[in-house]
Structures are given as C-alpha cells and as structure tokens.
Image: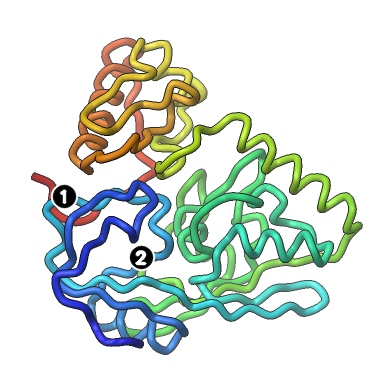
Amino acid sequence: MTGYLSNAPLGRCCTFLTGGRARRLAFCYNISELAEAAAGGALVLGRGSNILLGDAGYDGDVVINRSGRRSFTPDTCECDSGVLLSALAREYMQLGRHGLEWAYGLPGTVGGAIVGNAGAFGGSIADSVVSVTVLSGGKIKTLGVRECGFGYRHSDIKGTVLSVILKADAGDRESVKLASEQNILRRRELQPLGASAGSVFKKTEMGSAGELIEKAGIKGLGAGGAQISDKHANFIVNRGGALSGDILQLINTAQAAVFDKFGIELKREIKLYGDFY
C-alpha cells in the first residue's frame, strides 16, 4: 500500500463528487493491504457509488479499495472485493457466464454490492453468492450465503469484505450478451446522466420511492448545486458545484414530503460518512 496522504480531498472518491477532506487517505491494491488497513480502523471505501461524504470531512483514516484479482473455474468466479462490478459483469458477458446480466453498467465494487445486496431488474448479488470472506473482530472468516443474512438491499455482514466466490454457470453467450445489453440500455433510458449515487431510497411497501417523491410534488426540486432529478425522482444529481449539505437537504426534504403526504418513511440506500456542517 502506498503511504497515507494527509488532509486529502475526498470529493473524487465518491460518485456525488462532494465531500471534505480525510485526516489521512491511501489506496490499497491487494487483499493483504486491505486487511491491514481495515484492522487498523480505517474507513474502507470502494468506488463511492452509494455514499455521501460530509463537507466537514472525515476525522480519521480512509482507504480506497482497488484490489482487483479475479479468476474463473468452470462454474464459479473468485474475486477481490475491489473489483468493479460493471467490469465483472462485462467479463461474465464475454465468457457467456450467467448471473450478472442485471449488473452490466452498474457502478460500484463487488464488496459494496455484497454488503448492500445490490440489485436491479429483478436480480441481485445474493442470487450469485457462494461464500464471502470478511475481516471482522480482528479475524478473517468465510461466510456461507445463509450466514450473510441477505434481504432487500441489505445484508447482516459485519466487518470488511475481502473477497467473494460467486456462481458463474456457463450458458449461451449470445443470450447472456443480449440480456446484459438490454439492461444497460434500460439504465441509460430510465436514469439521469451526471454525478449521482444511484437510487437514494429503498423501495417501499407502496412501490417505487421515485413515484412517491414525484406524487409529493418535489420532482425537480433544487438546493444549491443539487437537484432531485426531473428524469427519475429517486436520483439526486450534482449539477455542478453542489455541496454534500445541498444533497442532504434534498434527502431530508423528500423524506418529509413523502411522510406528510402518504405517512410513509423513506429509508435511505446511501450511507452517510464524515461530518456535516
């Protein structure tokens, strides 16, 4: 692992492109470095595609996970947690392996996808998991899929995901390619361009959070440089120069508006880290 940088900016470490500075920041490129940093108490981030970092920064060590090893057997894939999920989905497509068609074009790392049980278009990462290796309580453990406690956009995994083994069953390459390409086209059609963190809120018992936000009358609402997307109301977009505080203001406004109109509490998918003014 390269040395830590002091007072390092975090804005480029998340897809919102906002946030203050970390007390120290480093990048790790293999599992040994990742385990060492996590055991030392560092906050481990992947591609920052499901987080919001406070404008006042993070008073601690932050490590960006860039571990990238992966290998295939006839029916599985073993990969590091820092592997980019969309790149892995592309490899599945090229090899004609089933299971990650839904993830083609989805940002974030495999580790982040595991912790949050990422999914789309009727699929999720939990459907493919064989086992997950984590660092928890100072010990490295391997969890079977049932021990992971997967639920909708949720897992019971504690600690830092180091590596995973996923199902990678061989299939018809053309059908895998067709499904993958259809999903990325749907993504481009339905979701806004620009700096965002994907879906802000989880689906509710009454359906799509985006539809509820739209019916509450605040689709397109702006705050500073941020805006609730006028294309998909469950996305908040940094239009340029947004602060994390602008984004948090819109998150709170959406929760309040939906609760006032429908009595439903929207639950965030994205996680907050650091200090907010």
Q: Rate crowding at label 2 as few (under 14), some (14 to 19) or many (20 or more) other CA atoms within 10 Å.
A: many
The residue positioned 35% from the left and 29% from the top of the image is: 266
The residue positioned 44% from the left and 21% from the top of the image is: 230
Going by the numbered disc 1, the residue's amino acid type is: Asp
For the N terminus, the image quarter is bottom left
Side of 44 relative to 120 (left or right)? left
Asked if the residue at tag 2 contacts the one at tag 1, i.e. Cβ–Cβ closer than 8 Å, the answer is: no
Report the coloring of the rendering.
rainbow
> Quarter of the image holding residue 270?
top left
The residue positioned 60% from the left and 56% from the top of the image is: 126
Residue 151: image location, x then y, percent? 51, 48
Residue 96: image location, x then y, percent? 84, 62
- What is the secondary structure assignment of the residue under circle 1? loop
Residue 133: image location, x then y, percent? 50, 77
Q: Which residue is mark 2?
A: 45
Side of 32 relative to 41 (left or right)? right
Side of 55 relative to 177 (left or right)? left
Residue 35: image location, x then y, percent? 37, 83
> Quarter of the image holding residue 73?
bottom right
Q: Which residue is mark 1?
A: 55
